[in-house]
Image (cartoon, rainbow, N blue to C red):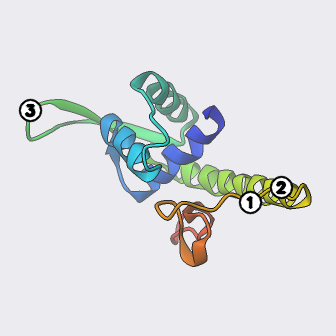
């Protein structure tokens, strides 16, 4: 799970600025409830990405009056996301080849994660500038 947290967070932030609770909710919804991240898992990832310069943070006051820390992906983070994506595509292709060789059924991609032609959404082309 830890290895997947970086590309997931960067991909969510590539969609637009967000804050902790909204990121947790997006992960839960995107995974169809299969991934249930906690604050204790997410915030160390966000802090590490911020230290690395992959994301930037700013404080804003919500309509409720509550302060929220919003995160935004940086150009360095977009480059990191592109590299993470290439690596995950290689892992996916490798596992699928191995499972085929073992005559194991290749898991279907759930509709909630499917992109064009039934491929995982993360395998679809990245938007311009990502």
Image location of residue 4, percent across then percent down = 61, 41
| Nearer to us in this view, 67 or 27 | 27
Q: Callout 1: few (<14), some (14-19), or many (20+) C-alpha neighbours within 10 Å?
A: few
Give the quarter of the image for residue 18: top left
Q: Secondary structure at mark 3?
A: loop
What separation in Å lies between label 1 and label 3 (alpha carbons)?
49 Å
Extreme-bottom residue of the structure: 117
Residue under label 3, please give it.
65
| Circle count | 3
**Residue found at x 47% / y 42%:** 55
Image location of residue 32, percent across then percent down = 43, 50
Left or right of residue 115: residue 107: right
Split into 4 quadrants, where in the image is the C terminus?
A: bottom right
Residue under label 2, please give it.
99
From this view, report whether residue 13 is shown above or below residue 121. above
Q: Secondary structure at mark 1?
A: loop
Residue under label 1, please give it.
106
Who comes first in sequence, dot 1 or dot 3? 3
Who comes first in sequence, dot 2 or dot 3? 3
**Residue found at x 49% / y 65%:** 111
Left or right of residue 24: residue 1: right
From this view, report whether residue 24 is shown above or below residue 15. above
**Residue found at x 62% / y 32%:** 2
């Amino acid at each position: 799970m830890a290895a997947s947290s970086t590309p997931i967070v960067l991909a969510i932030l590539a969609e637009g600025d967000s804050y902790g609770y909204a990121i947790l909710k997006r992960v839960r919804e995107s995974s169809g409830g299969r991934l249930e991240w906690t604050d204790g898992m997410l915030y160390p990832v966000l802090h590490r990405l911020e230290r690395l310069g992959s994301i930037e943070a700013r404080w804003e006051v919500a309509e409720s009056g509550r302060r929220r820390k919003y995160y935004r992906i940086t150009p360095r983070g977009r480059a990191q996301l592109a590299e993470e994506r290439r690596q995950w595509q290689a892992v996916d292709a490798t596992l699928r080849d191995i499972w085929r060789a073992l005559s194991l059924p290749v898991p279907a991609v759930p509709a909630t994660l499917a992109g064009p032609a039934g491929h995982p959404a993360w395998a679809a082309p990245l938007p311009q500038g990502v």
